[in-house]
Amino acid sequence: MTLTWTPNDALAIAVLRPSQLLQQPNFAALAKPLSASISENLGASMADVEQVTWIMPNGANLAEPRQMVVLQTKTPEACLAIAKAVSPNAVQAEDILGAPFEGSPSYVRPNPRTIIFGAAPDLRLLVAGPRGAPEITKNPAWATAVRGDLATAVDVKAMRQFFEQATREGSPETIAFSAVGPLWKSADVVVQSLSAGKTLDADLTAFCARESDAVRVADTLKAVAVLGRNAAEGSQKDLVDRAFARPQMAVQLMFVRMAEDVLKNTEVDRNGSTVTARIRSNLDAQALAPLVSMIQSSQVAAARARTFNNLRQIALAMHNYHDTYGCLPPAVMLGPDGKTTHSWRVALLPFLEALDVYDKYRFDEPWNSEHNLALADSMPAVYRHPGDNARSTNTSYFVLTGEGGLFGAKPTKKGMSFRDVLDGTSNTVLAVESKQNTPWMKPADIEFDATRGMAQFTPLHKTGVNAAFADGSARLLPANLETKKLNAVFTAAASEIVDIP
């Protein structure tokens, strides 16, 4: 672990080595689902990130926390991708010592494979001031911690006044915080490490000014371990009984058993004014297998929730357009010359809080003119699938065109009215999700084929295709949906009523 780009007076730091963590045998089972989730947000694979350093700079406090994040990647390309994905509105400080970046999210790239995010004043001090290993890392515990996968160090003494202030609030959380007061009242510096080898192991070392302080810290840690173990043991029987009736309780039971294992294998030792808590758990990849399943299930559920939200917002915008113009937008609109074609996605911009983009768009030019293409990066987020890179300007949401549907088969200046939806708005598809790699401004959708059924879509999920209905709801069209039923929800006035849960 390198701390080259860390202020030497930092109040707290946490260092993680993602690429190394991915190679640990105990982490391999979790690597794939976690990597997929993180890559979605980072714009690069976890394997491309050598080190992530989180920093609380001097002068920060708990009431108004400030932070910096240093990412060190294996390649310059990964570094640039992360910069754009993590903070697309940030300003790169080319000359941060002289440039007035106050109030703007900023970053610096001191070399092609390193990027530092933070508030401009902190970045300016970092570049100009002394940096390197902070004082809180100049101890034997840190030398051991850096050989692991995660290491943290906290200047507890410098932050003590903020802890004391927090305990005066009187909430249940602060009462519990007060119960472990010796941990932050008597320790000066705390160093923690985590290693994911064959088992998950952790060390916590507290450095105190006096032996009497260390005694209080050690006693508190031992008490926390005993009370936690007793609570875990006491709650297991109840959770076992409830898990039979409510399967979701099995996840809580798993975590309680993990906590019990960790607390049973916690040893607290004191050597003079230094206290060390060692955890040598029995948790291995097999024990973590249920956690993998839970992560994967939660990712699928979260992605579907975000997609449903996008579809509902698109449907709401369609309804607002209809309220304004008395009809839906046509799938392909004609420009002022009656020939140039434009997409319904552009027509909805004023109803998706993107009026400024709509006003800049030129309907007397092709959608892919030089001027209009310059607006591609301004795509509303609801047009982007949650699983796509944050920089993507392709859409995954389309209407279905063709005779008998809501959007017809030919370009026009005026769309269909909801009054003409005789099958009922809850029985008629408004838009669908499909992987087409289509630029969002391009007037291209899915031409419905009544003979192909669900095969005409490129689903993003094995379970089927997510769709918005004309009543504003979002539902799943199952992968095994009968072609007859799919045709029924496509048509708007064919007197076909089907039940799609």
Image (cartoon, rainbow, N blue to C red):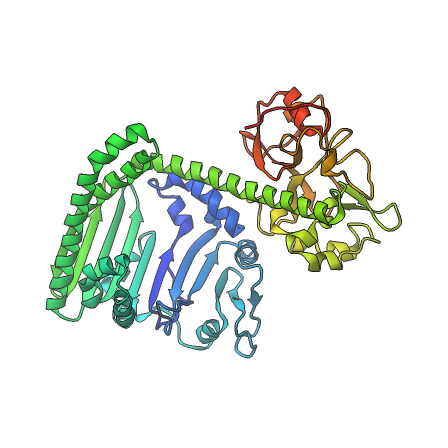
**Farthest front residue?**
419
Residue at 67 percent of width and 44 percent of height:
319
Is residue 180 in sight in this rendering? Answer: no
**Farthest right residue?**
337
**In the foreground, 287 or 301:** 301
* Residue 493 x, y percent position in the rendering: 73, 28
Residue at 17 percent of width and 56 percent of height:
221
Q: How many marks?
A: 0
* Residue 69 x, y percent position in the rendering: 44, 62
- In the figure, 146 relative to 24: above or below? below
Q: In this rendering, would 207 be left or right of 108? A: left
Quadrant for the N terminus, please: bottom left
* Residue 439 x, y percent position in the rendering: 70, 46
Residue at 69 percent of width and 42 percent of height:
438
Quadrant for the C terminus, please: top right
* Residue 433 x, y percent position in the rendering: 62, 37
Rendering quarter of residue 361 = bottom right
**In the foreground, 85 or 176:** 176
Rendering quarter of residue 437 = top right
